[in-house]
Image (spheres, grey):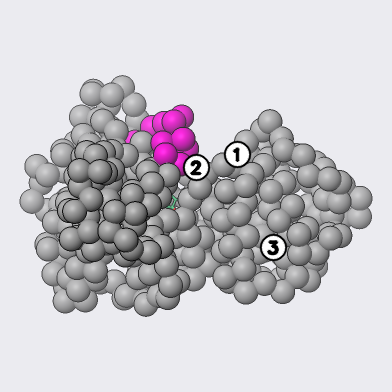
Amino acid sequence: MKIKVKSPGRVNLIGEHTDYNGGYVLPCALDLTIDFLFEKKLSVSYVESDLGYSMSFDVNSAFKKSNNHWENYVLGSVNELKQIKAKLNNFSCSIKSTLPSGAGISSSSALVCGLIKGLSELNEIKLENLDIINLSRNVEHKYIGLLGGIMDQYTILNAKKNTAILLNCEKLDSKFIKLEFKEYKLLLLNTNVQHNLANSEYNQRVSECKESMQIINRLCKKNYTNLSQVNRLDLSSSKEKLGETLYKRVSYVLNENQRVINSVEFLKNNKLKEFGRLLYESHFGLKNDYEVSCKELDFLVEYSMNYNQILGSRMMGGGFGGCTLSLIKDSLIDKFIKEVKQEYFSKFKRKLNPIIANLNHGIKMSLI
Ligand code: GLA
């Protein structure tokens, strides 16, 4: 028996850097996937990927961190499962991907969720979606060192076709929001920029948010457990003690949460222009207040403002590179891509990769 798993990437319509602050996000799954084929083996485990990676190891030997970043996703996933079942089966796993990596569309979460889903089945470990989500997040925290939130894993496990998930990341309750963009499409532009400080800058934002919350709790005698609960009065009375940077971070988080709520209303009522405006606002919040953008992303968003048929655009994901997301009229796509590619190349001497985001269901598994 072989096990096939298809694990998708994610796009996030709006609600960036709100997940680890207990706020709202509005993500969907892409039709681009990482595909796995698992099979039990007797002695050694072997994993190979069409990206040129391969590794062999014994699942039951003690965990040892590898110097190869990619291998730690595999070793970390195996080690997390070993906390549940001490002895696992060796296996082979062949991985093929249509999901670009380093583009801010969650290829790493798709990889880890796919590994955990397939390996748990192979070892008869019964896991609920939420268990897989938590284990996958542990892998990124403990073995990769990225203190990410829960949005990517939640989306990969739960998404439905042409639907966004309005997720409250504190309560982990969610609503499905059916999407109809009519003559508009979601277009991703991959900057091909992968900032090597992205992980440390990301973790720094996580700790700035924690610190802000502690300051506000102390000053206002409150017991907030995440930044999204903070009310605006408490924020303004803490302004001086927070200082300029932390004040900007908290303001961004509160504004972005509100933008998610407003976006859902606009989307439900087919107010795409109004939704598009929130995409732009989100970008400028991420650029100026949260400071996680970069010049390539800013250029693309600002360039798209020259076109009326683009209703909105913003950087997407953790930032410092990766993709922009734009809501663009179907009939403009070819012309826009041609023009923006040229402009981008002449400015940054880099290729720009467009991806039309078709929204699909979450992870699927089948036995063959
Ligand atoms: C990365 C993280 C997510 C989320 C986004 C920013 O994708 O993995 O948890 O924080 O950045 O919204």
Percent x, y for residue 26? 33, 64
Q: Which residue is tagged 2?
A: 101
Give SS at disc 3.
helix
Q: Nearer the viewer, residue 291 or 89?
A: 291
Residue drawn 22% across and 38% down?
244
Q: Does label 2 point to a residue whose CB lies under 8 Å from ligand 1?
A: no
**Please, what is the three-letter code of the amino acid marked with disc 1?**
Leu
Task: Work out whether mark 3 precedes mark 2 in sequence or the reverse, and give the earlier one.
Answer: 2
Residue drawn 80% across and 64% down?
85
| Disc 2 + disc 1, Cβ < 8 Å | yes
Q: Which residue is tagged 1?
A: 51
Q: Which residue is tagged 3?
A: 118
**Please, what is the three-letter code of the amino acid marked with disc 2?**
Ser
Relative horizontal placement of residue 158, taking residue 286 as reference (left or right): right
**Please, what is the three-letter code of the amino acid marked with disc 3?**
Gly
Q: Rounded to the nearest whole Å, what is the CA distance between mark 3 and mark 2?
A: 20 Å
